[in-house]
Image (tube, grey):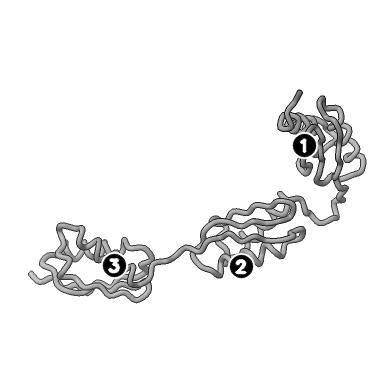
Amino acid sequence: MKSDSQLQRDVMAELEWEPSVDHADIGVAVTDGVVTLSGFVKSYAEKLAAEKAARRVAGVKALAEEIKVRFASDPKTADHEIAKRILDMFSWNVSIPDDKIAVKVEHGWVTLSGTVDWHYQSDEARKVAGKVNGVVGVGNLIEVRKLPTSGDIKDRIMAAFKRNADLDAASVTVFTDGGKVTLGGKVKAWNERQIAERAAWAAPCVTTVDDNIIVAF
């Protein structure tokens, strides 16, 4: 006797084998040998062909048919079509980092996940997804990355200075304003100045480094 999972695979394979059926938009679920077909087809004849294909699979006890006929002019509301439409809209929206967001659609319910740098990006993704035809709801699981503060940036730069044996960390001052870093103080050699500047640029979220360190021979 076939298990439900094996029967599901067999029905899906039979639908894929049947040339008069476009199986891409048909879902198959099996419970205790009862097969449920769902999704969309392009004609009533294709619907009947899908039913017939499922019934001829050995082990099918009964068939619950929930397939809907959807014409070419009807809105595209299959889950994978909704997901593709959302991803397309993300790619057109400059406010949304589409490469950082994953989209999952199940029965019209959209779940967004991933990590972005700013809250407005998460909010914009939620709003865009909710406008797509066929979406019944949006679960927003997108996380907003915690960006370093000016104090964090300064602490990381100072820690890098202290780790470097070729630099006298106590002789260099660091001032931060957002992503801008200003270095000051006095060092004994040019290579120390260069080490300090490289360390400042290596800190996350640094956009500008003003090197005012004086080399005192």
Residue position for label 1 = 31
Tag 3 secondary structure: helix
- Give the residue displayed 14% in from the left and 65% down from the top: 168
The quadrant in which the N terminus is found is: top right
As measured in the structure, the alpha-carbon distance from the residue carrying label 1 to the one carrying label 2 is 40 Å
As measured in the structure, the alpha-carbon distance from the residue carrying label 3 to the one carrying label 1 is 59 Å
Q: Earlier in the sequence, mark 3 or mark 2?
A: 2
Which x, y percent locates residue 24? 76, 41
Kindly identify which numbered label has been placed on residue 124. Answer: 2
Q: State whether residue 30 is above or below residue 186.
A: above
Viewed as shown, does residue 206 lie left or right of 100? left
Name the outermost residue toward the front.
32
Crowding near the residue tagged with mark 2, few <14, some 14–19, many ≥20 C-alpha atoms within 10 Å? some
Tag 1 secondary structure: strand
Viewed as shown, does residue 68 lie left or right of 168? right
Q: Mark 3 is on which residue type?
A: Asp
Kindly identify which numbered label has been placed on residue 16. Answer: none
Residue position for label 3 = 155
Tag 2 secondary structure: helix
Which x, y percent locates residue 109? 71, 56
Which x, y percent locates residue 47? 88, 40
Q: Nearer the viewer, mark 3 or mark 1?
A: 1
Q: Mark 1 is on which residue type?
A: Thr
Viewed as shown, does residue 129 lie left or right of 200? right
- Asked if disc 1 and disc 2 are in contact, CB closer than 8 Å, the reply is no
Viewed as shown, does residue 195 lie left or right of 27? left
Q: State whether residue 10 is above or below residue 165.
A: above
- Give the residue displayed 17% in from the left and 66% down from the top: 169
The quadrant in which the C terminus is found is: bottom left
